[in-house]
Image (cartoon, coloured by chain):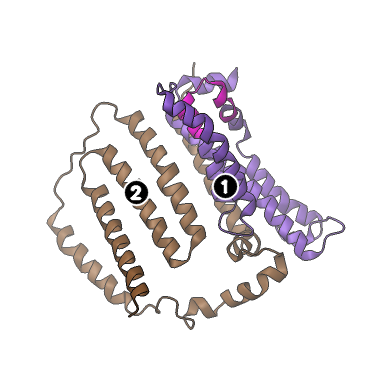
Chain colours: A brown, B purple
Amino acid sequence: MEKGSLMTFSFEILLLILLLVTAAGAILVKDLMSAILLLGSYSFFLSLVWAWFGAVDVAFVEAVVGSGLATVLFLLTLFGTAPKDSRLRRPPPPMAALVALPLLGILLLYAANDLPQFGDPNSPANVHISPTYLEQSYRDTHTPNVVTAVLMDYRSLDTMVETVVIFTAGIACALLLRRHAS
Amino acid sequence: MIRPHDSIIVQSLGRFLIPVIQIFGLYVLFFGQYGPGGGFVGGVILGTSMILSVLIFGHDASRSQIAKKILHGDGVGMLIYAGVGGLCMIGGGEFLNYAELDIPGLETAARRSLGIVLTQIGVAVDVAVTAVSIVFSLSAEEIIEDSLNG
């Protein structure tokens, strides 16, 4: 193995360790404020993982929404709901969960063996319709970013309904939380 | 209701950073066709800049008036997006088939590129307004209804 690849590999290991530590910390820590901030840093490390996979658009969204907007929304919720006591009382997990969840994890790891290799050119996801998009999207739409071309043109109806979902979330928050000054 | 932040450092930084964030959001929104970014991220960044001004300068500050005004625009983004789809139908195509946008002097690919830009603006407006609206819902009590009614 070359020195350069070894260095990137160790960087990825470091990234995964940080990811696991922040995720476990967000679950285990007692103070809710610390949990929110740990969750924000977890999202940031996750966005680095997406960027490492080459999914730059997803990384961008994860960094902006996960560690930016969601943290602010969580903090405002915390200030609005629990101004005095933000410490978490957590009962110990039941015995059945301690037995069943590791088994489920092992089962998932076993099933993950059948997944195609990362970056495999012959995997079903890479031979079905992606080549068509990659070859034709610039000629069809004059849009160099294939992700944007797929999201906003080929799959435009999906994106419109996603926008409806966001709109509905805003409306629901307003209906539930805004109080009338009567 | 959020009161203005006391620290002079936070206020000066906010005064400097908020326009920069807004320009960056517009850049991300319109550069989404050429690089990472797009309507969703650009809208979130634009909304976040307004949220930042509310968090720093408070609900009543003059700098937060844009954030208050923009609450009236709930649904405008959806209108833009679906309106582009409707224009495509008027042009004789399917819903959201940008190639049928009825604009003379543009070839098919350029029409589809224009359709992508317009729908991205729709998504950005929708997301920005929703982000600001949720923050106001979470933080404001009576002030929000007063500002909307009066």
Q: Is residue B131 above or below residue A129?
A: above
Residue at image position (75%, 65%) is B109
Q: CA distance from mark 1 to mark 2?
A: 21 Å
> How many C-alpha atoms fall within 10 Å of the one at disc 2: few (<14), some, or many (≥20)?
many
Residue A109 seen in the current view: yes
Q: Amino acid at mark 1?
A: Gly
Q: Nearer the viewer, residue B41 or A125?
A: B41
The numbered dot on residue B136 is none
**Residue A158 is a magenta residue:** no
The reply to whether callout 1 and callout 2 are in contact (CB within 8 Å) is: no
Q: Judge if badges 1 and 2 mark residues of a common chain.
A: no
Residue at image position (53%, 44%) is B44
Q: Chain of mark 2?
A: A
Going by the image, does A6 lie left or right of B5?
left
The N terminus of chain B - image quarter: top left
Mark 2 residue element: helix
Residue under label 1, please give it: B42
Q: Position of residue B150 (x, y in %)?
A: 60, 17
Q: Is residue A92 above or below residue B111?
A: above
Residue at image position (70%, 50%) is B118
Residue under label 2, please give it: A41
Going by the image, does B16 lie left or right of A34?
right
Q: Position of residue B46 (x, y in %)?
A: 56, 40
Q: Is residue A39 above or below residue B96?
A: above
Residue at image position (33%, 65%) is A12
Q: Nearer the viewer, residue A126 or A100?
A: A126
Report the magenta residues as a range: B50-67
Main SS, magenta residues: helix
Q: Amino acid at mark 2?
A: Ser
Q: Position of residue A92 (x, y in %)?
A: 13, 48
